[in-house]
Amino acid sequence: MDITTFKRAEIKFLVTASQRAMLEKAFAQRMIPDEHGESTICNIYCDTPDFRLIRRSLEKPVYKEKFRIRSYGRVKEDGKVFMELKKKYDGIVYKRRISLTQADAVDYINGCEALPKDGQIEREIDYFVKFYGGLVPAMYICYDRSAYFCEEDPGLRVTFDRNILWRTENVSLTSRPSGRQILKPGQSLMEIKCAGAIPMWLVELLSKGGIRQISFSKYGTAYTTMIREMNERGVYCA
């Protein structure tokens, strides 16, 4: 069954290949690969033409929001995708998600059709899209993910994202996953997702490995790179 709402803390770390190996060895005692344990996740981040959403997010406000369409691997027009409204307030992430076909998602973003259903989450998404007006597919980001959940506490999840790629051309989930790298060779972005405090055994593992929490956004990092390169070429950016 697809989970449609989330409320949790998402804590991020950049880890080396050796740090990841140490963690995954320890996870064998407590963690289980989840339903999408090994997968390629593809995302279309939708934004205003002037990138208002990500520019606001990079200012690190107390409240920020993002809107994306996600698939597990490359999809066909009739393939299943997830439309997600992600909000973060005071360090806590709130996510609303619906599933629909790729074709229906494209028709909705292009303003050709309404959402296929009329539930509470659909109405929240529709209000958001109409509030910002003129949202467009702004950036494609994909990555290979390994995901685990805790046997004792299924609300505790850990993911490792590697081979994080981005592009602003051919922004479609029906296209082959490709783009430019965000991370250095051997690095993975680890996220701990939990409803409460991180358990002590995991805190001790992080300390043992010298692993420190960071602030990191895939979309934000790619956008910042894009703007820097445009400025270096002398392209005016609003």
Image: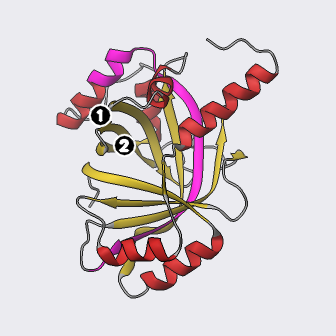
Q: Which residues are magenta?
A: 127-151
Residue 75 magenta-drawn? Answer: no
Residue 140 magenta-drawn? Answer: yes
As displayed, is residue 167 above or below residue 163? above
Name the N-terminal-most of marks 2 and 1: 2
- Image x and y of residue 1, in percent: 26, 61
Q: Residue beneath label 1, please?
A: 116
Q: Residue beneath label 2, please?
A: 100
Q: Residues within 10 Å of mark 1 (few under 14, many from 20)?
A: few
At label 1, the amino acid type is: Pro
Relative depth, front residue between 41 and 188: 188
Give the position of the C terminus as an image quadrant: top right
Q: Is residue 16 left or right of residue 100?
A: right
- Image x and y of residue 22, in percent: 54, 80
Relative depth, front residue between 89 and 4: 89
Q: Kindly give the residue lying farthest to the right in the view shown.
A: 233
Asked if residue 169 shows in the view, the reply is no
Q: Residues within 10 Å of mark 2 (few under 14, many from 20)?
A: some
Say which residue appears at 39% left-offset and 88% top-offset: 29
At label 2, the amino acid type is: Leu
Q: CA distance from mark 2 to mark 1?
A: 8 Å
Asked if residue 21 shows in the view, the reply is yes
- Image x and y of residue 159, in percent: 46, 64
